[in-house]
Amino acid sequence: MKLKDIRALASVQGPARSVSERLARSCYSVEDMRKLAARRLPKSILEYIEGGGEDEVSLRRNLSSFDDWSFLPKWGSVEDLDLGSTLLGGPVAMPVTLSPTGGTRLFHPGGESAVARAASAAGIPYGLAHLSTTPMEDVSAAAPGLRRWFNLEPTPDTGLLQAVLDRVSAAGYEALLVNVDCRAIGHRERDYRNGFTAPPSIKPKTVLEGALHPAWALGFLANDAIAFPNLDAEIPEGPLASSPDMWRTLLAGSYEPTDWDDIRELRERWNGPIVLKGVVNPNDAGLAAALGIDAIQVSNHGGRQLDHMAAPLDVLQDIVGRTGQRMEIIVDGGIRRGSDVVKALALGADACSIGRPYLYGLAAAGQAGVAHVLNLFHAEITRTMMLLGVSSVEELRAEGRDLIRHRSEAFARTQPTGIPEARLGLAEMRTP
């Protein structure tokens, strides 16, 4: 090979000019972002993100359930491919939402505001947790154009309920995400073994972890103390609880018995959309539809609550069959790729919601990291739809069950007579 040929082949990149460019060059998947986050975070903080309830059977099944489905691409023209659709009466740039997560500033000082700005730039909704570490009003100010949803728990205290709803409405949140899977806090054994508390308590182990992760420690110490400002009216004055039962203390109001009457009361008091989050039982989905609930989020809380709970993807078809067109369906749990989103939509979901993936991005690189994760999902959904042979979310949902096959289903032998003539253009080609 001549020297001029070698020069033509040589490609030398200059240094990355931004965090976004650096991530684009080195992180090609959510798993890459997880590995970067793992280097940045103390072990106890990372395992708080990653852990599940008890033996973590539900956590593992959430991931493996997607592997049970295979694509059956169709051949044909894919034109003007578009990921845009609508959700709860408003537009979304892709069929993805961001689930609420508590204690978000534990992972990066930018916290919920950084997540909100990234979601707004991506054109997708963000659900703010009741246990957020940033006041709901500050999140609104950080991303005024964002479609904001607020996450809360049912309560039989109508006075407290109305006070919360008034504050949420005044802060510009368009929809409620109502947890129906938090009557008790899951037994998250990783956290107990790690001595995890939120906010972190100062122990010898905490000091050592901070020393081994100086960037995280500096960000944590240089910013405001971790607190839960959206609970100000619901917890007593004084230090936040730091025992293994801290979540029980912070969510004390959630443990009063609640039932469908409280959901009905909430429906009567809130004029905007309501999403019931944590539904996996098709009977509950039918009851929610009958009450006029706008959507359900099929979820087992990321495998963090009741272990051995059904994976959302495993019950999705039953729930779609039970609710019909009466409500929209969002799915979360185990979603790590754009192809996972496409599988869920093919099985009848309207959108998917992610939690851990964007937290990996936040921990790795703040707002730029969340934006990179969302860019990855957009690119992967686009590529999967292109290779599958569909041009829009509407087409994917309409034809989805013909484009996907479960491993338990026999692959029927395709007969030539079963191919639609219109698809092949044979109707016009036949001679009389």
Image: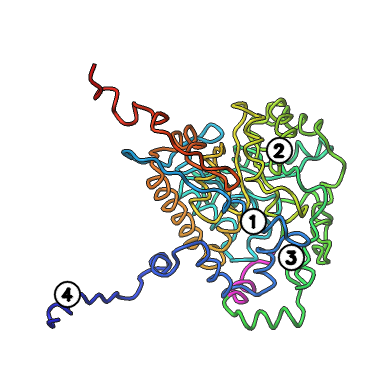
- Of circles 2 and 3, which is in front? 3
Amino acid on which disc 3 is placed? Ala
Q: Position of residue 147 (x, y in %)?
A: 54, 42
Per the image, the residue denoted by label 1 is 134
Dot 1 or dot 2, earlier in sequence: 1
Residue to which mark 4 is pinned: 8
Q: Which residue is mark 2?
A: 165
- Residues rendered magenta in the picture: 216-226
Location of residue 150 in the rendering, given as x and y in whole percent from the top left corner: 65, 44
**Disc 3 marks which residue?**
198
Distance (Cα) linking label 1 and label 2: 18 Å
Magenta segment main secondary structure:
helix
* Local SS, label 4: helix
Cα separation, mark 3 vs mark 1, equals: 14 Å
Instruction: Tell me the crowding category of disc 2: few under 14, some 14 to 19, or many 20 or more residues within 10 angstroms, Cα based.
Output: some
> Residue 8, image x and y in percent?
17, 74
Q: Which one is earlier in the sequence, the residue at label 4 or at label 1?
A: 4
Alpha carbons under labels 2 and 3: distance apart: 26 Å
Foreground: disc 4 or disc 3:
4
Q: Secondary structure at mark 3?
A: loop
Q: Secondary structure at mark 1?
A: loop
Which amino acid is tagged 4? Ala
Q: Earlier in the sequence, mark 2 or mark 4?
A: 4
